[in-house]
Structure formats: C-alpha cells, structure tokens
Amino acid sequence: MTVPLGRCVMSDAREINDMLFDAVNGHDMDEIMDCYQEDAVLVTPAGISEGREQISWYYQHLLTGFPDLHVTAWHKVLCDEPAMSEWTMTGTHTGPFLVPDGSVAEGTGRKIIIRGCGACSIDDGRIITHRDYYDQLELYNQIGFCLETEPV
C-alpha cells in the first residue's frame, strides 16, 4: 500500500527511513516532518520526543548546532519492519547546542563523527516510532566536553 505524503509517496518502512535520511541531509524540515505521524515518538539518547512538535524541535536543535550535518547509512538490514540502519553522523559544531547539564554549548568549530543505529516502525505510511542509539559521551567529547565526577 502506498500513501501520498506531502511531496512524496511512501510505501514501506525501509523506503520511509531512506526518505528521512534524504530529508535530514537536505536540512528540509518540511520533508523531515512529512515522514512522521502526528502522534509519533522519537527516542534518542538525548530524550523522548512525543508528537511532531517535539520531534521538529529535536531536528531543528540538531541542525542549528551542526549546520553541515550529514547522516550516512552504511548498513541497512533487510527486513520488512522495523527498518534498521547503522549510520555515521558527521558535522561541524558551529551553532548553539544544548548539553546534559541544561547549559548551551556555543559553536566550537570542532568536527564530529558519531556512529549509531536506528529503527523505524510505520503505521499508515508514516513513522510512528523511531529509535536512534548512539554514544552521547562520544558526541560531547568530540565537541570538547568531558565527564566530571564528584569523589564518593
């Protein structure tokens, strides 16, 4: 079954996931959001985004902090549902980016190369659940932050 969505027609989880990669790499928020159901849930190490408004904020935040962000899917698992991909995210930290303590890290000019994987499930031709897994410590370390602990 194919369902028209905005400017595209999508039919299965793999195709929708590939369309999402293209939209993210094109930095096209309308196309990114066309991939998601109104009540979709995005789960990442940064937190849980429920609904299109929160999901949109997540992508806008990422693209603001890393305006040259690019995601390369280098392994796509051949299964019907969910669409599973291993990917590498690259970019340059030149914009503001929220860090775990709630402060904002201004652009550092540092390059990132982050490895991760994700799973997308669809309902009625759009993503209903999307889970991305990557090492947050790797990301923060690459933009110049380190883990500090208090003595026990």
Image (cartoon, helix red, strand yellow):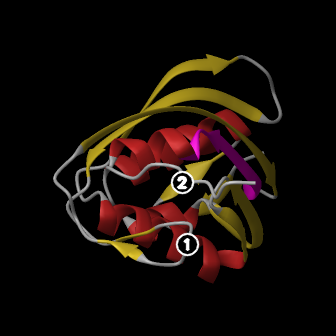
Which image quadrant for residue 150?
bottom right
Let me know if residue 12 appears in the view. no
The residue singled out by tag 1 in the image is: 101
Task: Tell me the magenta residue range.
Answer: 125-136
Q: Position of residue 77 (x, y in %)?
A: 69, 18
Q: Nearer the viewer, residue 79 or 95?
A: 95
Residue 148 is labelled as: 2
Residue shown at 81% from the left, 58% from the top: 124
Q: Position of residue 132 (x, y in %)?
A: 66, 45
Q: Secondary structure at mark 1?
A: loop
Asked whether disc 2 touches disc 1, contact meaning CB atoms under 8 Å apart, the reply is no
Q: Is residue 7 magenta?
A: no
Residue shown at 83% from the left, 34% from the top: 81
- Please state if 139 lies on the left or on the right of 40 as rendered: left
Residue shown at 31% from the left, 49% from the top: 69
Amino acid type at mark 2: Glu
Please tell me how crowded label 2 is: few (under 14), some (14-19), or many (20+) other residues with Cα within 10 Å. few
Which image quadrant for residue 78?
top right
